[in-house]
Each structure stands twice: as C-alpha cells, then as structure tokens.
Amino acid sequence: MSRKSIVVAALLSTATLGAVAGMTFPLAVAAPAQSAQARVDAAYAAMGGDKIAALKTITLKAHLAQYDPGESYSVHDPDKPGVNSSELIQYRDISRNLTRNWWWDRPKNDDGLRRNYYEVVTATAGWNVGNEASNGRTPKRAVMLNGVTAHTFSGKRLTVTLREQERLNIVPAMKAHPDRVTAMADQTVNGKTYPAVQYKSDYGTFIVMFDPATNLPARVRTPDWDALEGDSNYDAEFFDWRDVAGTKMPFHIFYTLNGMTICDMTIRDVVANPTLAANLFDIPADQLAKAAKPMDPRVTPFHWAIRRTYSSFYMDVDNQYGDEGTSPTIADIGPYISETQGWTHNTVFIDMGPYLIAMEAPNDDGQAIAHLKVARQKYGNKPIKYLVLSHHHVDHVGGMRTFIGEGATVVVGKGDGDYFRKALARPQTQNWNAPSKDKPYKPEVIENTGTWTVKEGNREVDFYMIDNPHADDMQMGWLPDLKLGLVTDIWNPGPPVTASNPNLAAVIHAVDKLGLKPVKFAGGHGSVGDYAQAERVVKAAEKK
C-alpha cells in the first residue's frame, strides 16, 4: 500500500495515528541515552540552526497525488481508485504564522470537472474563497465575494489544518516549546529503529522520529481515529532534504494511514524570503469577527476532513453530518420500514416484529447515536439484531460500533468478513463517541456470499450481492411484499432520473438478472424513487 504527501513548513490536511490490534501507542518513558531536548537541539542544528529564524517568508509549489482507502473499490486494494491529484501554490508569512494556499486543478467529483479556490489560515481563523463542496453544498454561513462563494472555516477544519501545518514545522515548534517535549523509547517501523520524542501541541500529540545518521526528522506520527480502521497510525515521512537559504527542508512528504497511502506530495519552486503583498492574508473584518476558533483536537475528525477535502465531498461545518442547526428525522417509506432523513446520509430501519434490522451506519458513531435516538422515538427499545452494510465505504459504515454496542450483528458483502473482523477488534482509545463500557461490545460479522435472507413471521428481507462499478462488495436490499428495493450510492432515489450512468445501469441490470419486479427504491441517500422511471431512462440510453 502506498502513497505520499509533501509540504514544507506549511499546511495541508492529513494526519492520523492510533493503535491497531496488537499495537499500542508509545507513551513517554524514562529518558533514553540522549535526552529529549538534546534530540530536538540536534535536529534544529541539522536543519540550519539560527538560520531558521532568518527565514521570514516563503513560497512554494507542490503536486499532490491523493488517495482515500475508505473509498476504494475493494478493501483488498485500498489505493484504487485514487481521488486524483491537485496542485498547490503556498505563501507563508512565517514570522506571523499566516498561510495562503491556492489550490488549483483539484477534483470535483460530482460532475467530473476540476476546481480552483484559495484559503487563508491563521492561528484563530480560516477563510475559504471558492465553492469546494460537491453538488453546491456550501454552509449556510457562506457569502458571495466578487462573484464566488466564500466562507469561514469550521472549528474542526481549522484544527485539522493547523495541526498539519505544525507537523511540517515540527522541529522549530519543539524548539520553541521545550516544556511540551517528552522523552520516548525508540520506535521501530517497518524493521527500522528511530530515536523518538513526544510533542504535545494545542492541536494534538505528535511522535517525532529522527534519522539517527542525520538527526533530521524522518517520520512524524499522530494518534488518530479513523471510523473504518479504528485506532490508527498516521505518518508523514520526510525525504529529499534540500538547502533553502541555509536551512534544510524536505521536498517530498509521504503520508500513510496504517501503511496505506493517503497523499504523495512533491515540492518545487521554493523561494526564500520573497516580498508578499500586504493584503495577501486578509480576511474580511465582518467574517473574521464571527469565525470559528480551533476545535478541541480530541473531538476533531481529522481524516474525515482531510480526505473529504481531497475529493470535494467535505461540507465544512462543525455539525459534520448536515448544515449547522439541522437534525435528523425519521420517516416511513412503507409499512414497517423507515429511514432517517435531514442529513447527508440515511439509515434504514426495518421492523421485523420482535427486532429491527438497520441498513447503513453513516459517517461515525456521532451520527449513529443521533439516528438511533430518532429510531427509539418511533420503535421504542426494540432491539437491533442486524446491521447490514451495503458496502465498505467509510461514509456508510463509520457508525457501526454504536450498533454493535446495541447488540447488532454486522452483515457485510462478499470477501469483506476478515477485514471487518480485524477492524472491529482494534482499540477505540481515540474514538470520542465510543460505545459505553457499560454495554457489552462483542463484534460478530456475517459475510453475504451471494444472497442473505431474514424471515420473521410473514416478513422477509433479502440482500443480494450485485455487480457494479462503485464497490466490489455491494449489497442491494429487497422487501418482496412491498416490492421495495434498497440501494446506496449507485442510485440516490428521489428526484426524477433524467440521465443514465453506469451505476444506475448496474441497479437496473441487477434487478433484471434477479427477476425482481420493484415499484420503488430507497436507501442510503435521497428519499424514495420510482423504479419504472429509472428503468426507462437506462434502457432508452442503451438502445441508442
């Protein structure tokens, strides 16, 4: 698994560290042969020593290859497909801790186009100019600026960005705050041993590993929560150190999550101490006055913000699941079946009489808690026996641990059983919404190898594995007595279908292959859609 990311004393958005099964977070221990501060001093000297302070401003260009293992086609090949590439031009006023990032030729996944925008980052506020969310989803607080959409950062996004900037400027940060540096035992990664220290900043805890030959930082790790992987190690590896005005700077940075590539970034065209325009870092006064301050890193979804920003699916709100001030509701979509609505992702609840079946656990355990709350208002304390995950993508499975804490057995697609058993067995020390320890947490996983059926009295629910271009583990739900299908991502039922696409065609072909006669479809997005109308569009397109 591979991929890298690079940025210099600057910004970006990526980070994560945690514990994986059999892995524990290294904690501060008795000082090794060389003290923690001696390690920092040696690294500072190797990077240029006093010349670092002479670097007041800097500009650079960078190319980023970006990946999201939580959205891969298969859990067995998490680097494919990548989420494409981006170009970055960055301006930094180091002396005032100000950054302006000009992003261009970045993916915009809802229409296949590319997007360009810029952002200003300060210690107390962030400012984005340009619509970076898919499907026009910008926060209600957005304003128009010179004909384009602009908005302040959410507190969560600001914390993510500031932490990632600090990761790339970690040695000067530790030098400036020796009281935050603690000795650690040497760390071994991929068979190589590094001297290391721990650094606690306002934006999280870093484990800094040094190259014993050069004293330069080799790998900077953070403990993070990933809603699919669990407690995880998020690493930035530094390569290709070059001289910049007498200081050393990495021109290649490679980011990984539990060894899986997240970003591969290559820097070029670095200019030291350029003269920067006085208004380059301006944020309108009225927006600055009400901008969100950094969020507590202990409740910040670092990887959600990093990877959704890469792909343009990030809605920059602290609510995370929908715009600020919104909350989920639950609506019947047929007899004994309901779905949550009001946020970007749905959970479907099927009443089997003595128990419920849930389909989808979107985003993270915070959303699962909210969805269960509205389900309890309708169904009381009826137990949830099964949680069916249509496919492995993190935005539809991240809340699964909450359902397990309620006693649900998880049903996953063909080939996913071992992956989910391992992921669900990992620690949750970084999960701020972890299930209560008062409830038994016993993950049980069923793998659907083709068809999985539940019958209870006169109620039957079937889940079929179907071929499609979105994910190789896709399950489609079917309630025969209601003639209702359930599907996620490959069709968002609701508005009239006006054009065919390969994902929608996969639904129609699966229905034909299975010999089903649906009337309606619902699922993980949207509301309820008319099947006959979707079928007409697809088959008309295929006749052309």
Image (cartoon, rainbow, N blue to C red):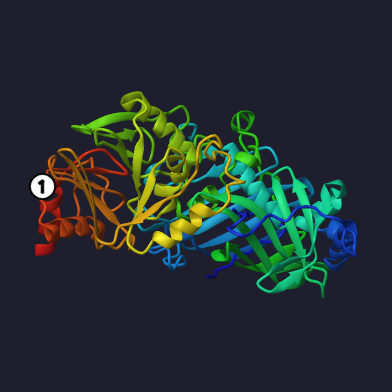
Q: Quadrant of residue 238?
A: bottom right
In this rendering, would 334 be left or right of 108? left
- Does residue 519 appear to the left or right of 303 in the view shown? left
Q: Quadrant of the C terminus?
A: bottom left
- Where residue 8 sits: x, y (%)? 69, 61
Q: How many numbered marks, from 0 up?
A: 1
Q: Which residue is mark 1?
A: 532
Residue at position x 59%, y 53% in the image: 13
Q: Nearer the viewer, residue 146 or 105?
A: 105
Question: x, y percentage for residue 124?
Answer: 68, 37
Between residue 240 and residue 228, name the one nearer to us.
Answer: 228
Name the residue: 9% across, 49% down: 517
Q: Is residue 16 visible?
A: yes
Closest to the observer: 102 or 421?
421
Q: Residue at x 60, y 39 (%)?
A: 299
Q: Residues within 10 Å of mark 1 (few under 14, many from 20)?
A: few
372 w.r.t. 427: above or below = above
Residue 219: name its quadrant. Answer: bottom right
> Secondary structure under badge 1?
helix
Where in the figure is residue 288, as x and y percent of width and height?
63, 33
Asked if residue 146 shows in the view, the reply is: no
Please name the amino acid that badge 1 sits on: Ala
Q: In terms of depth relative to the viewer, which is nearer, 275 or 329?
A: 329
Residue 327 horizontal/vertical position (percent) = 42, 29
